[in-house]
Image: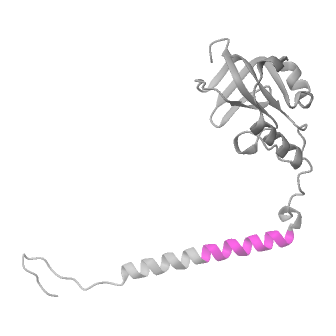
Amino acid sequence: MGSFSGGSTYREPTMIPALIIVAFLLLTGLGIWLGVRHQLRYSADNPAAVAPRAPDPDAARVLEARQMAERFVFDGSQVIDVDEAQLRADPVAWHGKTIRVRGTWSRGFESSSLAGAWLQPRVNVEHGPGERLVEVEGLWLFPRAPREGSLPGFGHLGMSWGELHVFVLRPLGAGT
């Protein structure tokens, strides 16, 4: 052991940091190897769990609806009055129509819906989380009925079965 000026003592480097790094790398590698081994065994024992989903038979309808929304030009003279109950009872019947509806707009973290469809405002709107009674006019897109085994395709991350593209929005009551 030597001494530096100022009274500090010099120490020889130890192998402890290197051993810690090597142990970390070995344990990480072991964890990855065990995880891959488990996944391979699971996949071999459960082939249905890893089978790819069948193609969505309605993918063309969903794509067509999205394209309709992109090309849509709002015309207030084409608006059809409908109530929220009618939209909920048979949403597909109103697909592609310009509608006016009074209903409850629910908005929260990564959600925005009215009558079971994603509400997509095309106008500036201030509405925080909660529910609010509104009257809206816009394009109703709901090309297919909800069913097990297929992905919805609309709204945030495609998790809604339909969309309402809103061009006119009138708040009718206070939000909750």
Q: On screen, 86 above or below 152?
A: above
How many labels sit on residues? 0
Residue at horizontal 88%, vertical 44%? 61
Where does residue 161 sit, x and y in percent of width and height? 82, 38
Q: What secondary structure characterizes most of the magenta part?
A: helix
Q: Residue at x 65, y 37 (%)?
A: 110
Q: Nearer the viewer, residue 62 or 147?
A: 62
Which residue is depicted at the point 85% across and 34% down?
A: 142
Indicate left or right for 15 with 81 as reference. left
Q: Is residue 31 magenta?
A: yes
- In this view, the residue in front, 79 or 17, is 79
Q: Quadrant of the N terminus?
A: bottom left
Q: Is residue 48 left or right of residue 168?
A: right
Q: How is the image coloured?
A: one colour
Is residue 79 at all visible to an observer of this figure?
A: no
- Any part of residue 14 in sight: yes
Q: From the image, which quarter does the C terminus lie in?
A: top right
Q: Position of residue 108 (x, y in %)?
A: 64, 31
Establish if 59 lies above or below 90: below
Residue 44 falls within the magenta-colored stretch:
yes
Residue that sits furthest to the bottom in the current view: 1
Which of 32/50 is in front?
A: 50
| Rendered view: 71 above or below 124 | below
Looking at the image, the residue that sits furthest to the top is 173
What is the residue that sits farthest to the left in this orientation? Answer: 6
The x and y percentages for residue 101 are 79, 18
**Image quadrant of residue 35?**
bottom right
Between 37 and 129, the residue placed more toward the observer is: 129
> Which residue is painted at 69% across and 25% down in the image?
106
Task: Say if 76 sits above or below 29 in the image.
Answer: above
Region of the chain picked out in magenta, as a range = 30-45
